[in-house]
Amino acid sequence: MGLKPYFYSMNALKEHFLLKPDSTFLNFGSFGATPRPVLEKWQSLQREFEEEPIQFMTVRGPQLLAASRAALAGFLGCDASDVVYVTNPSYAVSIITHSLHLRPGDEVLTTDLEYGACDRAWDHMCQLTGAKLVRVKVPFPYTDHTELVHAMEQHITPMTKLVFMSHITSATALIFPAKEICDLAKKHGILSFIDGAHVPAHIPLDLKTLGADIYTGACHKWMMGPKGTSFLYLAKPLQKIIAPLVVSWGFDPQNPDASDFVMRHEVQGTRDITGFITIPTCIDFMQQHQWTTVSAQCKELVHANAARFSALCQTPMTAAADGRYTGQMYSMQIRCKEPMQLQRHLYEQHHIEIPVMQLGDRVFIRYSINAFNSATDLDKLYTALETIINKGIYIHA
């Protein structure tokens, strides 16, 4: 009885997405599918851009971008002057790594479950500067926020300059205690940088309450924006010292109409800003379709199936499936010899789009659920994995 409203919503909302009907899409976590109203808005903006390229680039576009930034800021719980659009969170991380001016012996504190691209960005900068990336091993299976916060504090030293942590991890789909980590950083006088790529429209977020010095998130994941739409938030004291990767007309502008932070990071010369301008349409779409309720029902479906997948894979559950540590994604560990081949096999033989990711010596398969999914999709995944396991394809006991 409890799931009937969900299936009604799914049937009503599925038609808004262009996903192929013969594909079981369980990888919303990589990047989302954009609903038709947002796609149509994006395409209309691109046509408007082409009809009057100069006027759009110099007058109309900046006005629309400012309005879009204000709408995004309202959604995130911050001031419009404290957030800028970027193409993806990895780009935002590179902005920060290039602006911190790390020195030999400096330490950046993080975990061993961070997203690979961000991990590489920190590794690269530490190698260039002689700084050290300190990775704290996350207790696994994950059962207690307090244990992780304590482990992070134990690794803070006088050389620690910044703590970098996912709000929701990528490969393991765990919700981390971002608020507690930001409070911990303030207590020790170090900067906090939270990677919230998976957070907006997935779990509640209020940046003022969170208190992070730096936060980045994606609009092209759970917010369902066009690909290449994300944001970077900076607390005001940092805005004058964090420089953009591209120096362009936003430096010492002739007609400044926004904060220096916004001008320097968003005015980059010729580029297509139309994707960023669609974000108010994304927000309107979610409000129109009661997305808080839709998201809660998706989480219910995620959690209801977690135990049976872990049992099938004969591996411990990544975390308790009760909503404390997981949202609309769940990762189960799988004993897989060839993760890339398993991912291709699931897509090519079973038409299931799902990531299979290696993290150190462990392999995880992660399913994501959004409005167009149903229990049938997870049943299909279960049957496919059961067949693969029974035949011993790519998976070992």
Image: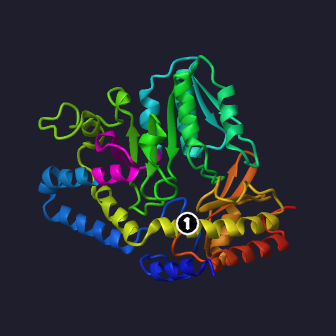
Q: Quadrant of residue 139?
A: top right
Q: Does 173 sit above or below residue 375?
A: above
* 382 horizontally vs 249: left or right: right
Q: Residue furthest right?
A: 397
Quarter of the picture holding the C terminus: bottom right
Q: Quadrant of residue 236?
A: top left
Front in this rendered view, residue 320 or 375? 320
Q: Does the rendering let one see residue 14?
A: yes
Within-10-Å neighbours for mark 1: few <14, some 14–19, many 20+: some
Q: Does 356 sit above or below residue 253?
A: below
What x and y, as percent, mark residue 218?
45, 52
* 75 horizontally vs 268: left or right: right
What x and y, as percent, mark residue 213?
45, 33
Residue drawn at (52%, 66%) of the image: 295
What x and y, as percent, mark residue 318?
73, 54
The residue at which mark 1 appears reads as 296
* Colour theme: rainbow
Was residue 163 drawn as part of the magenta stretch in this picture? no
Q: Secondary structure at mark 1?
A: helix
Quarter of the picture holding the N terminus: bottom right
Amino acid type, residue under disc 1 in the picture? Ala
Magenta residues (range):
69-89
Residue drawn at (16%, 35%) of the image: 253
Was residue 74 drawn as part of the magenta stretch in this picture? yes
Residue drawn at (55%, 46%) of the image: 167
What x and y, as percent, mark residue 202?
51, 58
* 303 horizontally vs 205: left or right: right
Residue drawn at (25%, 42%) of the image: 267
